Amino acid sequence: MSQPQETITPARSDPPSGAATPPASEPNSSSKSAAKKEAKRLEKEAKLAAKALRVAATTPTGEKKAKEKVSKEQVVPFVNTTPKGQKKDLSGPMAAGYDPIAVEATWYDWWLEQDFFKPELGPDGGPKPQGLFVISAPPPNVTGSLHIGHALTTAIQDTLVRWYRMSGKTTLFVPGFDHAGISTQSVVEKRLLKTGRTRHDLGRAKFVETVMDWKNDYQERITNQLHRLGGSYDWSRVAFTMNPQLSKAVIENFCRLHEEGIIYRANRLVNWCVRLNTTLSNLEVDQKLLEKRTFLSVPGYDPKEKFEFGAIVADERIIVATTRPETMLGDTAIAVHPNDDRYKHLHGKFAVHPFVGRRIPIVTDDIVVDMTFGTGAVKITPAHDPNDYEVGVRHKLDFINILNDDGTFNANAGPQFHGMKRFHARVEVVKRLKELGLYIESKDNPMQIPICRCAINLVTSFEPILKPQWWVNCKPLAEEAIKHTRAGELRIAPKQSEGDWFRWLENIQDWCISRQLWWGHRCPAYFVRIDGQEQDSTDGKWWVTGRDLEEATDRAKKLAGSSNFTLEQDEDVLDTWFSSALWPFSILGWPDKTADFEKFYPTSMLETGWDILFFWVARMVMLGLRLTGKMPFNEVFCHAMIRDAHGRKMSKSLGNVIDPLDVIQGLPLDKLHEKLHEGNLDAAEIEKAKSGQKKDFPKGIPQCGTDALRFALCAYSGGGRDINLEILRVEGYRKFCNKIFNATKFAMLKLDNAFIPESAPKPTGNESLVERWILHKLNIASAETNKQLNERNFMAATNAVYNFWLYELCDVYIEAMKPMTDSSVPSRPRASAQQTLYTCLDYGLRLLHPFMPFVTEELWQRLARRPNDTTPSIMVSRYPIYVPIRAGRSLAASYNLQSDIQIFLHIQDDTEAALFESQKGVITTLTKGCKSVDVVRDIGEVPPGCGSTVLTSTISIHILVRGLVDLDAEIAKCEKKLQLARMNLDKVRKVEAQPDYAETVPDNVRLINEDRRKTLEAEVSTLESSKEMFAKLK
């Protein structure tokens, strides 16, 4: 999946947040009383230290140093004394100030112990009636620890999961890890090289065992990072792409697609990496544009050597030009345009190769040759160029491979070049052309050179080479993906990514899935070597597949007939993306029909970076549809790419790659420098990276805490493709956390020990103007936050809750209510102000919780509970919902009603009816001119003469307008709305009436259509009743 930052030395997991070990001189008592005493002692010392700091701040300059020294000696780091998994003891007073390490300690372990992260099912054992939200986390690679991009992924996904969980839905957030074949093998091999060994010294089994040790180290480290980031994953379902169940899915996938003819074996041109000695797909090779002649260093050569690129070289007799002179040793034809008069006399003739004496046919081709470019004659190297390969197929040319796997030339290149490295051969070919008088000129020519994105950005480590490999015929898979996407079964956001999606699928190429590695899923394919027969191992007809050796043997017997045979399993492994493409359903038990697969598939959403839309998302969709018959998710949200504050891509050599734990905990500059030595950078690169770090973080990275980091990353996410991350902005949100902490601490002083919150947040009608105003603002913030989260606009959602807390609750209401809670104020207005304050704190913290899980849990747990409220944690409390005040206001405004407004809420659902019954006072208070609000269960209880609007299939709003409106105008208005509602209803019904609708359309899409149909049916019924009612009043 997304590429984690590579480090070389496996590091043990950091301790969980705040889980510092007590000093050795102090007993680590597990008794509760000892823990309380220790906490009080530390709190007392922290207060003394804070007092010393305040004194130091007012000390004259001459005495400053001495005072600072004293204060540093007295500051005591936070020590977590809560036993793992137990709830934090908050019976003591709040700390003097906000400390993210102290606040975030212990909560995650307690959430885990309480099973809050597991899906809460309904009475029937299935998802709850409120709905289902399932998301499979993109599995990070085990090559190294997470970087800040992974923190963005976790922040966005967990915000949604927590929001849906608090909204009453059954939620499942599945974590996992990707084995990342090429990247992980490359990192471990480099580590071995430092000890003077290679994988071949260990042997395949021992090497795989060594890589598994690496994987275990980094899986533990990444798990700790995800804990620290607060991700509410169901860890009981954690997956790894090479565990037995997921490996079973990979084998089933390969065998089934091979049986169906989708997977085939062919000797075709591939991207061969001469450094890693493996094939890569086209998607794994980036192209770097060179505008002009450029000299570059090449991996595997002396760093002092530079080789020429971006130059076109011409040689004589029949003049051809090339940017890769060394490949002329594999030329098997010269192509000219059939209409080019300059060469018509040469059609069907031969040229003689100047180095190897080979007779080369001159062929005509109007596809590859542009008469106006260069000389109009093109050298053809079918075995080493994708375009030339197609020419070779069209004209049945010879395919001559001149390269060994390590990038040296083989005997086909001729004796003078045999064994020579390819770029040394480039220099030598030009030199020999000059000696033979065949060289004409070299001049600038824009060209693209390949760069490996899988390992370490190896420049020019690729050569196109013919190799027998396993391929996936993607065309029929892509056609299905396009069809289902256009049918509305998949939404892709932002919109610009949707255009990229269709363009790529419409121009898709076959996918090479063979990799010449040891770390990964070995191909379940076997060559059947039959005694006494001549066989070509590149021909797929001599190969069988099997889910196990027994199945493969049975198939081999049928192929060999009565002859003896031996089975030889393919040594190659499969492309990492071939296994991760199964992720949304393999983690739920596929190919078995498990309970999880039946309950939770298809999943709800895939959230990932736009840069792997084709690597991963498209392949999940193609294989999901092929293997399960269903779209694996109905929504794809592509987050932005994180860059540094200067807009540069994160790079180890620039020193701007950020570990999220360093932002959470803070890290001095010298420690940042030390971490550079854990990677693969050479001395010069380390110095360059140090310089970058010093420029960007002159004082190191400040301690920001998880909540500030998560909130900042969500606040950056407004739909763009890039985020220029500034740590100072993250630090700014740490100050926001501090503001929330101190405001809550102050506000709770106004809720004295005698305060008991009302059983429901229902206004009495006696609230002061400022109380009504803040409740109104709370409702607006709730509506806006829910709306923006639903629309996946995380920037706007964070703005809504930030503005409520900072500019409305803290800056206005808390200041305004200070005199209202003075002991001299009469009890009734004082109690009213307290109740309003409590409601704002309670719901304000809930609004904020999905973004900032730790500080909101810490503060919410300190609030008193309403009578009969046994909710154990803020994360399983109900999220503030949008009470339909705005809809009632809009309906009243449409009739120009400003006073004596009577509202009737027709609610069909029991849970919703109880909720709105408790909110009647809020609706009355916040709807200007409202006289009364009634919740009715039977439509017959709504009096005649009401104007109406439908919110959902189970909620409609009615306002009494009898005697206040023009009846003919209202009947006409109803008729107009009826026409539109009936038209929309017909559209939905037509979709549902399609043949095989139940079999071909995923369950989640059918549920959406069903809900829309029911809402439209309710709207039609309500409008028909209103029209009839107005007619009777005439």
Image (cartoon, rainbow, N blue to C red):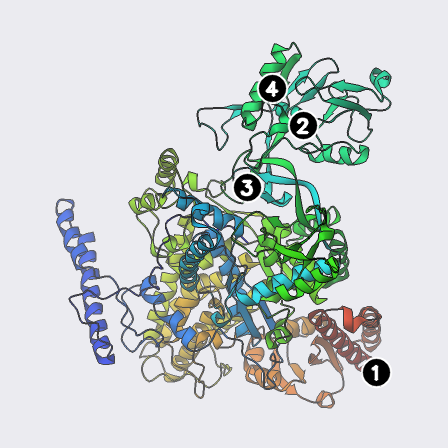
Could you classify mark 4 by the number of other residues whose Cα lies within 10 Å: few (under 14), some (14-19), or many (20 or more)?
Answer: many
Could you classify mark 3 by the number of other residues whose Cα lies within 10 Å: few (under 14), some (14-19), or many (20 or more)?
Answer: some
Mark found first going from the N terminus, 1 or 2: 2
Secondary element type, mark 1: helix
Question: Does 381 appear above or below 476?
Answer: above
Q: Between label 4 and label 1, give the one nearer the viewer.
A: 4
Which quadrant holds residue 736? Answer: bottom left
Give the CA distance from mark 4 to mark 2: 12 Å
Mark found first going from the N terminus, 4 or 2: 2
Which mark is on residue 277?
3
Q: Amino acid at mark 4?
A: Val
Q: Is residue 885 visible?
A: no
Q: Between label 1 and label 2, give the one nearer the viewer.
A: 2
Question: Does 352 appear above or below 621?
Answer: above
Give the CA distance from mark 3 to mark 1: 79 Å
Residue that label 1 marks: 1028
Q: Amino acid at mark 3?
A: Asn
* Residue placed most toward the observer, 812 or 931: 812
Mark 1 and mark 2 residues within 8 Å of each other at the beta carbon: no
Which quadrant holds residue 740? Answer: bottom left
Q: Between label 3 and label 1, give the one nearer the viewer.
A: 3
Residue that label 4 marks: 429
* Residue placed most toward the observer, 674 or 218: 218
Which mark is on residue 330?
2
Secondary element type, mark 3: loop
* Residue placed most toward the observer, 522 or 847: 522
Q: Position of residue 949 (x, y in %)?
A: 72, 75
Give the CA distance from mark 3 to mark 2: 21 Å
